[in-house]
Amino acid sequence: MIKNIGSYLFVILAICSLAFYSFSSKETFKVGDSYLTEGLALNYNMVNDSVSHNNAKALKTDIASSFSPSLGKTYVGFKEALGFKESRGNYFTVNTLGYLGKYQFGKETLKIIGIHNPVQFLKNPELQEKAFLANAERNKWILRRDIKKYVGKKINGVVITESGILAAAHLSGPGNVKKYLRSHGSTSFSDAYGTTIEYYMKKFSGYDTSFVKPNKKAKVVKA
């Protein structure tokens, strides 16, 4: 009996000893190398950053494009389109034939509308804008009867509009436009670079040029 009790006590003591040493161990659990991030280049999010940056840049471009002002078929749209065709909108250029500025004026035309200093003219964008309007007003007065008669008709497949007539007059002078209209396109004109009245009639068709008032004595009024 006593022997059996001793055996039980020994077993109990042995179990308690093992439990004690298990819980009091100073050894710490070490995470395996496959779980550690120390020393690694954690750039997994760089692709997303790049995509976000590109998307933001694209969005900015789209917004800029969406909100770019459109001049449409207004008078301002008309003169800007014509200025771009003549010189890419460059106020300070002189072409190989000596035509000046954004709208490529000849010196004789400038004299007619009251400008006698081509050098000053070339340096002054405001003066060039005034010259464009004065010349258009004068041309509209000269062509007033032709505008009334031919607008809405077709010549060589091109619908005649007031803005087309004024653009062609800027290119060739009002006299050549009269000849073209009154000959129903059989008498044409092209400048030294091969640009024709018909081309300008078509390219600058349909703009609202009601802002331009016919004026026989149109002159540039300097500020």
Image (cartoon, rainbow, N blue to C red):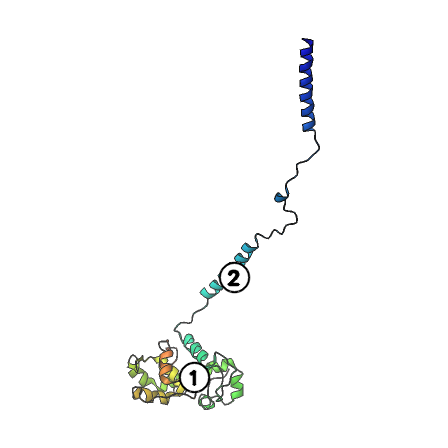
Q: Position of residue 43 (x, y in %)?
A: 59, 53
Nearer the observer, 185 or 5: 5
For the residues marked 2 and 1, what is the alpha-carbon distance in whole angstroms?
A: 44 Å
Amino acid type for the residue under numbered disc 2: Lys
In the image, taking residue 197 as reference, residue 118 lies left or right, namely right
**SS at circle 2:** helix
Please state the horizontal and vertical placement of residue 73, each as a whole percent of the image: 38, 73
Q: Earlier in the sequence, mark 2 or mark 1?
A: 2
Tell me the element at label 1.
helix
Residue 162: percent from left, percent from top? 34, 80
Q: Residue furthest top?
A: 1
In the image, residue 1 sits, relative to residue 201, either above or below, namely: above
Q: Quadrant of residue 113?
A: bottom left
Dot 1, crowdedness within 10 Å: few (<14), some or many (≥20)? many
Q: Nearer the viewer, residue 90 or 75?
A: 90
Question: Could you tell me if the residues under marks 2 and 1 are in contact, i.e. CB atoms within 8 Å?
Answer: no
Residue 75's label in the rendered image is none
| Residue at 44 percent of width and 79 percent of height | 85
- Residue neighbourhood size for the residue with mark 2, other residues' Cα within 10 Å, grouped as few (<14), some (14–19), many (≥20): few
Q: Amino acid at mark 1?
A: Ala
Q: Identify the residue position indicated by label 2 in the image.
A: 57
Q: What percent of the width, then of the height, locates residue 42?
A: 61, 51
Please tell me which residue lies in front, 133 or 201: 201
Q: Residue at x 45, y 78 (%)?
A: 84
Q: Provide the residue designation for mark 1.
A: 134
Q: Is residue 15 above or below residue 83?
A: above
